[in-house]
């Protein structure tokens, strides 16, 4: 019994160490930036919709990038397909993918599994983009969403949105989870002070392409 207990303890410690190692690799700014936001999101999650305007305000106020990861929850029937559609629009342009996600968040209450496709078609027409009958014929976009979800599971994500302020170099923790969103700006400002600025590059992007985080 003692040996079994010891084995369980060792296994738990090893799992925690692995999760921490994965976090250190994932929770960092894009190359060239000292401070960024990292968010694990579910397009059908009401709280993600409530958080979206605040994230947008933070990006615009502090000129820091926002790195999004898809984490569709099993309880939400159209969240996964919504993420695939968002990634399709990402392939057209980063700005278009961002606008689609924002449009979904604003219209969550009226979107269902049955009308998600018509919603996406309407969005595509409004932006002069063709939405093919099969948006992911080779399954590449689906694989990207699954990869993001697996990544979130590996670092212990269990709810959405999970938001981090991450830094490339600071004296304290390189990433801080934003548990209370009313403290978001305070956490960002502290990170900027400790990191000695927000970026090494000339301008911070509003968002990255899905492929740029691979």
Image (cartoon, rainbow, N blue to C red):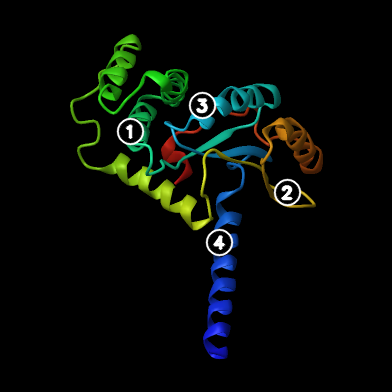
Comparing labels 2 and 4, the label whose residue is closer to the camera: 4
Q: Residues within 10 Å of mark 2 (few under 14, many from 20)?
A: some
Q: Position of residue 74 (x, y in %)?
A: 37, 44
Look at the numbered discs 2 and 1 and tell me whether their residues touch, using CB distance below 8 Å.
Answer: no
Look at the numbered discs 1 and 4 and tell me whether their residues touch, using CB distance below 8 Å.
Answer: no
Q: Position of residue 207 (x, y in %)?
A: 52, 29
Look at the numbered discs 3 and 1 and tell me whether their residues touch, using CB distance below 8 Å.
Answer: no
Comparing labels 2 and 3, the label whose residue is closer to the camera: 3
Q: Residues within 10 Å of mark 4 (few under 14, many from 20)?
A: some
Residue identified by numbered label 1 = 78
| Label 2 vs 3, first from the N-terminus | 3
Left or right of 33? Residue 93 is left
Residue identified by numbered label 2 = 169
Q: Position of residue 2 (x, y in %)?
A: 57, 89
Residue identified by numbered label 3 = 49
Residue identified by numbered label 4 = 19
Q: SS class of the residue under badge 3?
A: helix
**Image quarter for residue 75?**
top left
Comparing labels 2 and 1, the label whose residue is closer to the camera: 1
Left or right of 109? Residue 19 is right
| Label 2 vs 4, first from the N-terminus | 4
Question: Total number of numbered labels?
Answer: 4
Q: What distance separates the C-alpha of mark 3 from that of mark 1?
A: 15 Å
Residue closest to the eye, 159 or 209: 159
Q: What distance separates the C-alpha of mark 2 from that of mark 1?
A: 38 Å
**Image quarter for residue 23?**
bottom right
């Amino acid at each position: 019994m003692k040996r079994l207990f010891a084995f369980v303890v060792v296994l738990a410690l090893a799992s925690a160490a692995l999760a921490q190692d994965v976090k250190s690799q994932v929770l960092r700014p894009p190359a060239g930036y000292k401070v960024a936001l990292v968010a694990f999101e579910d397009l059908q999650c009401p709280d993600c919709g409530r958080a979206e305007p605040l994230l947008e305000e933070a990006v615009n106020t502090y000129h820091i990038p926002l790195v999004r990861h898809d984490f569709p929850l099993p309880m939400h029937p159209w969240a996964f397909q919504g993420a695939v559609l968002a990634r399709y629009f990402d392939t057209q342009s980063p700005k278009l993918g961002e606008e689609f996600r924002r449009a979904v968040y604003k219209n969550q209450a009226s979107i269902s599994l049955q009308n998600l496709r018509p919603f996406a078609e309407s969005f595509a027409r409004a932006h002069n983009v063709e939405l093919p009958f099969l948006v992911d014929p080779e399954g590449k976009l689906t694989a990207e969403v699954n990869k993001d979800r697996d990544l979130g599971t590996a670092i212990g994500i269990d709810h959405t949105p999970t938001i981090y302020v991450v830094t490339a170099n600071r004296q304290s923790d390189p990433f801080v989870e934003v548990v209370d969103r009313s403290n978001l700006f305070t956490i960002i400002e502290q990170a900027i002070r400790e990191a000695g600025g927000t970026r090494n590059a000339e301008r911070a992007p509003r968002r990255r392409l899905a492929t740029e985080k691979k």
